[in-house]
Image: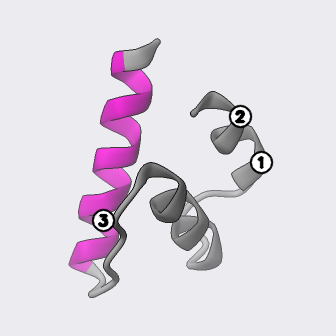
Amino acid sequence: MELTVELFWKTLKQVLAYNKVECFSPRDCVKKAFRFGIVDDDEIVLDML
C-alpha cells in the first residue's frame, strides 16, 4: 500500500509540474490536484496519506 500511495503522489507531482504548478509535499500535491480537477475527492486521498 505504501508504494502505491508514494507512486500516486509523485505522479500527481509530475502532472502538476507539466501544467506549470509546483507542489512540495504529498498533502500539497493532493490539494492542488483537487483544485485543478485532477482528483475528484481530496479527502479520500488525504486519508490514504
Of label 3 and label 2, which has the lower sequence position? 3
Quickly name the residue at label 3.
15
Q: Nearer the viewer, mark 3 or mark 1?
A: 1
Of label 3 and label 1, which has the lower sequence position? 3
User: Relative to 6, is 40 on the left or the right?
Assistant: right
* Mark 1: secondary structure: helix
* Residue 47 numbered mark, or none: 2
Query: Local crowd at mark 1 within 10 Å, few (<14), some, or many (≥20)?
Result: few
Mark 1: amino acid: Glu
User: Relative to 37, is 10 on the left or the right?
Assistant: left
Task: Look at 63% across and 77% down and name the residue there.
Answer: 35
Determine if the magenta segment contains residue 10: yes
Q: Quadrant of the C terminus?
A: top right
Residue 26, position in %: x, y? 44, 50
Residue 40, position in %: x, y? 70, 57
* Residue 43 numbered mark, or none: 1
Residue 12, position in %: x, y? 37, 56
